Image: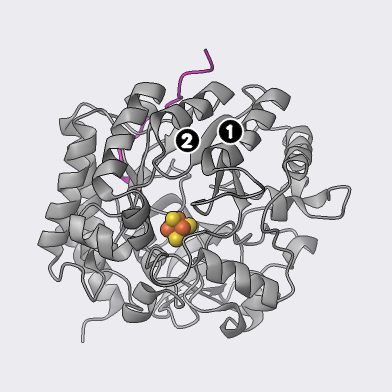
Amino acid sequence: MQSRTDLVEGLMGRFPQVPREAVVKEDLLRGGVAFDDSALTDNDGGDVKPKSYFIFSFDHRTLPELGTAALRRPPEEIVLTGGPYGLRRTVVSVRVNPDSPYRVKEDGDGRLRLFLENRSIADVGLPPMPDYYRHALANGKSVMEVAPTIQWGYLIYLTVFRVCQYFGVKEECQYCDINHNWRQHKQAGRPYTGVKPVEEVLEALDIIDRHDTAGATKAYTLTGGSITSQVEGLTEADFYGRYAQAIEERFPGRWIGKVVAQALPRAEVQRFHDYGIRIYHPNYEVWDKRLFSLYCPGKERYVGREEWHRRILDSAEVFGPRNVIPNFVAGVEMAAPYGFSSVDEALDSTAEGLRFFMSRGITPRFTTWCPEPTTPLGKANPQGASLEYHIRLLEIYRETMRANGLSSPPGYGPAGPGRAVFSVSSFMDSLPAEPETQPPSRA
Ligand code: SF4
């Protein structure tokens, strides 16, 4: 049987134009990593920034199955350098899998390293506890709970609605554990606010603003579950819009404002823009028509794929195509029971979607699918998608972008191996080195 090392090194050999950093990163993101107890954090009392569980669990086991990692959180991210592959600085979001062939542990010299099948392949750096995490809100809530930061501190992630109104197997996206993640944190007695009050968000942002003296935080994302009826008497656009409005009134232009929401009608999208949001993410999830209807049944039923795509194009007229950045979940194209069984077919379909958007100046981006164990697709595909799919997708993405005269999307930090901070896929690590692209400032 082929070892994981053989798989990784075989792909590095076959696709030398894909940075080696991206091969290791994609494999860690799709399959997770184990931690020795010595590599865990001391939660909010230590020197290492803990994993915040900012929206989904992004773990390969439920909390009760994580052992010590459920009590002492793993770090939010790790940064890899050096080793036999000579890795340049690579930031990787942490997805815990106690059975992974990758393990972070101390080497004989007391330094943390990443091991693959018991061979050290990289030095591991941990994110320092940011100063703003050491200050609580007046009601005692932590900044990490209300306004966690990811991407090595670049992005403030504001999941202001921690559940989704697409509920149950007939409506939830089949790879999404947002509702389960809410339940498991509640059951573990962790603070996990369902709807974050606007005032709490502003207070947490104020703490970040005062204590992030280096200006490391550059953007915020407003997001959460879909709203099909109302939350606190508000429809989706009004609910998320009220945070945008309040943040931009209080901190005008301090951060690049982004909203991840459904593909909404143009008039509602216009309100986000009017409030000062600069980037809109109406995520299309998976391109293939049949898979969209099967794997995103709620979105198909309430909006429908064709209407979803139409609204994405409409929103480009509001924000400008560069500032509409719909996400897809890379890998679910290959998920059993309905996904493509061949890498070529899955990539052909994904590439068709990329061409559809990029030929219109819209730059999609993707996160690497984590097969969370409580989701239907995670249960059916515990190993995730093939690593070859993920590696070849990076090439196709870069090539389609080049063919359409596009560069890295705005609001993601610098691009290129050794420079990228985007942690939940390696698309930014695989693009040519470029300084950060900025969206236009407010009119
Ligand atoms: S719309 Fe789908 S992916 Fe988004 S939170 Fe709801 S179930 Fe999850």
> Rounded to the nearest whole Å, what is the CA distance between mark 1 and mark 2?
8 Å
- Please identify the quarter of the rendering in which residue 329 is found: bottom left
Kindly tell me whether mark 1's CB lies below 8 Å from ligand 1.
no
Is 165 situated left or right of 427 in this image?
A: right
User: Considering depth in this image, is 235 or 114 the residue closer to the camera?
Assistant: 235
User: Considering depth in this image, is 124 or 41 the residue closer to the camera?
Assistant: 41
Q: Helix, strand, or loop for circle 2?
A: loop
- Please identify the quarter of the rendering in which residue 412 is found: top left
List the residue tagged with mark 1: 218
Amino acid under disc 2? Gly
Q: Is residue 283 visible?
A: yes
In percent of width and height, residue 263 lies at: 39, 41
The residue located at (10%, 60%) in the rendering is: 344
Q: Is residue 428 magenta?
A: no
| For marks 1 and 2 on the same chain, the one whose residue lies earlier in the sequence | 1
List the residue tagged with mark 2: 413
Q: Is residue 442 magenta?
A: yes
In percent of width and height, residue 285 lies at: 33, 53
Region of the chain picked out in magenta, as a range = 430-443
Q: Quadrant of the N terminus?
A: bottom left
Q: Residue furthest bottom?
A: 1
Q: Helix, strand, or loop for circle 1?
A: loop
